[in-house]
Image (cartoon, helix red, strand yellow):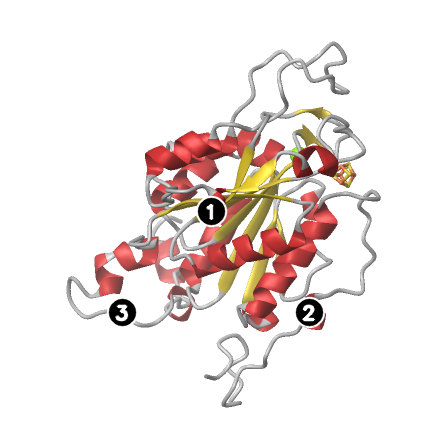
Amino acid sequence: MSCITCNSSNSTTPTPTMKDFSSKNIFTWCTNCGNYGIHTALRRALVSKKIPACQTLTCFDIGCNGNGSDKIGGYNFHGLHGRVIPLAVGAKMANRKITVIALGGDGGTLGEGIGHLVHGIRGNYNITFVLHNNLNYGLTKGQASPTSKKDMKMNSSPDGATSELLHPAKFVLSLESTFVARSFSGDVKHMTKVFEQALDHQGFSFVEIMQACPTYNKETPHEWYMDRVYDAESVEGFDNSNREQALKIADDQEEKIAVGVLYQDKNSVPQIDRQPNRNGSIGQKIETEAFEETRQYDISKLLEKFK
Ligand code: SF4
Ligand code: MG
């Protein structure tokens, strides 16, 4: 296969290595931040799935996660707060052959950007979305976010957060999601496995990473998660194609926390393949990518009419 990005005439695409997804830029995250593990796992998953860096686009939201935008190889886009999903969706719709990953925090995704999350899932756009859920707005110094626990003492609410939290997995499972997974930032091996499954999925893959933020969230460090997580696969009779079971197993975020692929619709059809002109159900099937179909039009004559 020739390179879809550079149109190289090489007969084979290069086998990716961890180095391809590395960067010379210096990491600026705090010591022991969960972001280090998330980036390592994502790189490992891309390499193990043999996805070349030149065919990978990672899109970043504003936030501590976004400070990783120049620390990973391949193509990158660092967008506005809460807007990472439409950016990623647009890129994928323009060229379905590239692998598109979007990363966002709990504040941007479940606060400002929650509408984009809902419609990304509704449309079942074929991207992998990684929620960095550290239960606070870390970049702006530890304010309560939509996933902060009620009564949690944060910098914006020293007497404790007064709103109920939004439960990411249950919220996403309540929509017509086709892939919902959960892992935590202290287990690179487990995150890698979950990312691999998310990259394989045809449709919108939602992956929540319960992320340690040792600087501003003292309540749930890695040790807290390590004492509580268990693999959903280890539960006898658990069937992750059953949404009701997934909702039930996802519920507990406090005592015994299930991780792994909680729900997957194996018959998922991504957005682009639902479109009649693309899937050939009407007329001739369009095989080209949208970016190849764009043209430059001279509209000067048209504009003259309005002078
Ligand atoms: Fe990581 Fe928290 Fe520091 Fe942000 S504030 S870099 S999330 S530890
Ligand atoms: Mg956050």
Horizontal side of 76 relative to 298 (left or right) equals right
The answer to whether the residue bearing label 2 lies less than 8 angstroms from the nearest atom of ligand 1 is no
Left or right of 73, for residue 203:
left
Residue on which disc 1 sits: 233
| Residue that badge 2 annotates | 18
Cα distance in 3D space between marks 3 and 2: 35 Å
Question: Circle 2: is it few (<14), some (14-19), or many (20+) Cα within 10 Å?
Answer: some
Give the distance between the C-alpha atoms of the residues marked 1 and 3, in whole angstroms.
Answer: 40 Å
Amino acid found under the numbered disc labelled 3:
Ile
Q: Marks 1 and 2: in contact by CB < 8 Å? A: no
Q: Is residue 102 above or below residue 23?
A: above
Farthest residue, direction left: 282
Q: Rounded to the nearest whole Å, what is the CA distance between mark 2 and mark 1? A: 28 Å
Is label 1 within 8 A of ligand 2 (CB to nearest ligand atom)? no
Q: Closer to the camera, 24 or 148?
A: 148
Q: Seen from this angle, which residue lies furthest front?
A: 236
Q: State the image coordinates of residue 136 (x, y, percent, origin top left).
A: 68, 29
Q: Looking at the image, is mark 2 or mark 1 earlier in the sequence?
A: 2
Q: Quadrant of residue 26?
A: bottom right
- Find out whether the residues at labels 3 and 2 contact each other: C-beta distance under 8 Å: no
Which image quarter holds the N terminus?
bottom left
Residue at 44% over, 68% down: 97
Residue drawn at point x = 56 percent, y = 31 percent: 256
Rendered residue at 57%/68% (across/down): 48
Q: Which residue is mark 3?
A: 286
Q: Is residue 112 above or below residue 5?
A: above
Res. 241 image quadrant:
top left
